[in-house]
Image: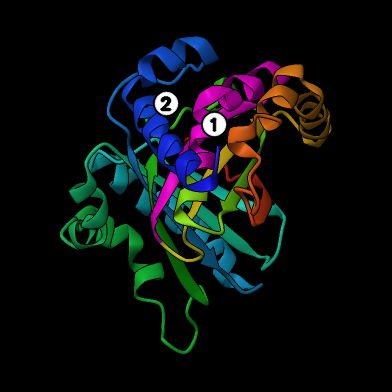
C-alpha cells in the first residue's frame, strides 16, 4: 500500500476508533468513564528560588484550588518538578467538562470575594518582586478512549506517589493522528498491565510545539516507574503494536519527546 492510500485509510480508521471508544475501553481495561471528553488547562508556573515558592504553594492551597472547585473545576492536580528542566516550577492540572468554564476561570475568579481575599498576597504582590517569573498554559482535550482525569487510588489518602508527564510531538498532523490511534488500539491497556496508572491522555489544542499529545502516568515511587516502563517495553502486545505497519512509516509518528517526573504538592487532589 502506498503512503497516500495508507494515510487515507489511517484517517478513516482513526475516526472509526474514536466513534467506538466505549468498545475500546472494555478491551483496554481503562477505568475512565465512558462519557464526553474533558478539557484541561495545564499550567506551568516558572518560579525563582526564594519566598515566591512558598507564596505560590499557599496560593494554590488556600485560594486557587478551593475557588476552582467552586466553579466546578476538579479534581485539580498541583505538582512540583522532581526530575526535569526549569526547576523550581509548579504544574497545575485543571480539568472541566465545560470548555467555557475553563477558559473564563480567571475572569470568574476575580468576581469571587472569598478568593480575592485569600489570593491577595499572590495576586497583589509588588511588581518589583512577583511570586513567579512567568505562567505558561496549554489547552488540552482528553482522548475519547480515556475521557476523564482519573487520579490514582493513593491520591484520596494523600499516599506516596509520583507522576510521569510526557509530551509526544509529531512531525505532521497525520502522524499525530496515527499516534493517537495507536493509543486507542491497545496502548492504554498495555500501560495498565505494566502497572502504570493512567491519569489522563489528551490532545493539545492550544499551546506550543504543535501538533502534540500529552499524557500522565502515576507510580508509587521511582523504582516502580523504572520497573513498570521495563515491563511495558517487554510486553508482547506492545512489541506487536509497535511493529504494526500502520505505525511504522518514515518519518516516525513521534519526532520529539518531553519527559518530566513530578511530585504532588500537599494540596493536590490528583
- Asked whether 209 or 153 is in front, the reply is 209
> Label 1: few (<14), some or many (≥20) within 10 Å?
some
The residue indicated by pointer 1 is 183
Left or right: residue 63 versus residue 110 is right
The residue stretch that appears in magenta: 178-206
Checking the image for residue 145, the label placed there is 2
Task: Give the mark, 2 or 1, whose residue is nearer the N terminus.
Answer: 2
Checking the image for residue 167, the label placed there is none
Q: Where residue 266 sits in the image (x, y, percent)?
A: 57, 42
Residue pictured at 56% horizontal, 55% vertical: 170
Residue pictured at 41% horizontal, 86% vertical: 127
Left or right: residue 64 versus residue 103 is right
Q: Is residue 195 magenta?
A: yes
Number of labelled discs? 2
Above or below, 205 against 129 in this view is above
- Asked whether 37 or 155 is in front, the reply is 37
One can see residue 4 in this view: yes
One can see residue 157 in this view: no
Q: Where residue 25 sits in the image (x, y, percent)?
A: 45, 16
- Asked whether 207 or 244 is in front, the reply is 244
**What separation in Å lies between label 2 and label 1 (alpha carbons)?**
9 Å
Above or below, 98 against 218 in this view is below
| On-image quarter of the N terminus | top right
Above or below, 191 against 48 in this view is above
Q: Where residue 228 sits in the image (x, y, percent)?
A: 77, 27
Amino acid at each position: 500500500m502506498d503512503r497516500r492510500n495508507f494515510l487515507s485509510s489511517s484517517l478513516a480508521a482513526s475516526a472509526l476508533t474514536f466513534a467506538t471508544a466505549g468498545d475500546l475501553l472494555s478491551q483496554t481495561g481503562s477505568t475512565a468513564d465512558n462519557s464526553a471528553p474533558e478539557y484541561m488547562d495545564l499550567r506551568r508556573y516558572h518560579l525563582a528560588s526564594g519566598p515566591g515558592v512558598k507564596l505560590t504553594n499557599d496560593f494554590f492551597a488556600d485560594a486557587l484550588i478551593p475557588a476552582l472547585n467552586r466553579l466546578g473545576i476538579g479534581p485539580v492536580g498541583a505538582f512540583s518538578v522532581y526530575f526535569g528542566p526549569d526547576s523550581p516550577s509548579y504544574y497545575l492540572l485543571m480539568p472541566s467538562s465545560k470548555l467555557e468554564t475553563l477558559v473564563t476561570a480567571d475572569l470568574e475568579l476575580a468576581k469571587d470575594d472569598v478568593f480575592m481575599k485569600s489570593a491577595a498576597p499572590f495576586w497583589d504582590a509588588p511588581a518589583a518582586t512577583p511570586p513567579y517569573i512567568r505562567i505558561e498554559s496549554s489547552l488540552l482535550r482528553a482522548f475519547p478512549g480515556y475521557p476523564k482525569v482519573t487520579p490514582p487510588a493513593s491520591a484520596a489518602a494523600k499516599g506516596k506517589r509520583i507522576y510521569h508527564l510526557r509530551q509526544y510531538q509529531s512531525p505532521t498532523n497525520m502522524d499525530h493522528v496515527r499516534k493517537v490511534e495507536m493509543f486507542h488500539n491497545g496502548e492504554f491497556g498495555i500501560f495498565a498491565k505494566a502497572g502504570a496508572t493512567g491519569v489522563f491522555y489528551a490532545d493539545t489544542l492550544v499551546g506550543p510545539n504543535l501538533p502534540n499529545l500529552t499524557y500522565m502516568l502515576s507510580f508509587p515511587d521511582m523504582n516502580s516507574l523504572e520497573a513498570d516502563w521495563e515491563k511495558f517495553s517487554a510486553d508482547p502486545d506492545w512489541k506487536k503494536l509497535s511493529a504494526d505497519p500502520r505505525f511504522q512509516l518514515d518519518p516516525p509518528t513521534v519526532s520529539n519527546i518531553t519527559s518530566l517526573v513530578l511530585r504532588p504538592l500537599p494540596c493536590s487532589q490528583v
